[in-house]
Image (spheres, rainbow, N blue to C red):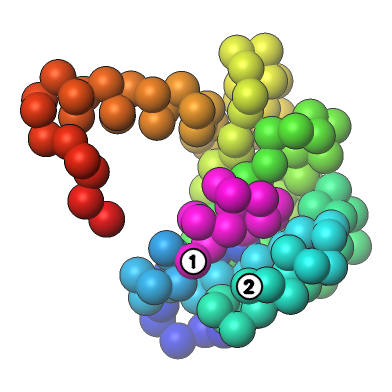
């Protein structure tokens, strides 16, 4: 996939991961979208560079994707703490320069940072802040 475009892998294609993968692709990046559920990969395969079915904590997957050559990996699921921790750890051990992980609470955020996540986002909390700022500023509804 080397052609000068930024390249990312997005692990977990729930609402957050799917939206992130599609937005990155539309912004000119190359995106590898990975999810354990076949239906999620199928739903996005025509809109990203590559989609595959796999468990994100699978060490052989991390090795086969040559993630160290990507600009970053996004661990977009927060529901399976063990899987997000393992995927973060494996990605960093493989030499990924930037790992963004999603956490559902402060404890998961702390653990993900300890195992090497370069940045952690709590999407619901972040969106709540953004909506509040837009409401206070009087610029609602939000434009896409």
Identify whether 100 is placed above or below 9: above
Residue at image coords 67%, 56%: 13
Of all residues shown, which one is farthest toward the top? 107
- Quarter of the figure with residue 10: bottom right
The segment highlighted magenta reads 10-22
Residue at image coords 50%, 28%: 124
| Residue 16 inside the magenta-drawn segment | yes
Mark 2 or mark 1, which has the lower sequence index?
A: 1
Observer able to see residue 114: no
Cα distance in 3D space between marks 2 and 1: 8 Å
Say which residue label 1 marks: 22
Identify whether 80 is placed above or below 65: above
Task: State if disc 1 and disc 2 touch (CB < 8 Å).
Answer: yes
Q: Where is residue 11 in the image (x, y as percent from the top left)?
A: 69, 54
State left or right for residue 59 relative to residue 6. Answer: right
- Quarter of the figure with residue 72: bottom right
Check residue 114 in the rendering and tell me which mark sits there, or answer none: none
């Amino acid at each position: 996939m080397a052609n000068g475009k930024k390249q990312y892998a997005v692990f977990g294609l729930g609402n957050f991961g799917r939206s992130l993968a599609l937005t990155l692709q539309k912004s000119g990046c190359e995106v590898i979208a990975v999810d354990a559920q076949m239906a999620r990969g199928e739903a996005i395969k025509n809109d990203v560079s590559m989609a595959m079915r796999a468990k994100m904590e699978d060490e052989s997957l991390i090795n086969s994707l040559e993630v160290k050559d990507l600009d970053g990996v996004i661990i977009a699921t927060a529901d399976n703490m063990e899987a997000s921790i393992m995927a973060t750890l494996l990605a960093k051990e493989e030499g990924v320069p930037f790992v963004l992980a999603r956490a559902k609470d402060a404890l998961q955020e702390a653990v993900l940072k300890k195992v090497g996540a370069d940045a952690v986002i709590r999407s619901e909390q972040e969106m709540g802040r953004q909506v509040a700022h837009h409401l206070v500023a009087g610029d609602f509804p939000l434009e896409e």
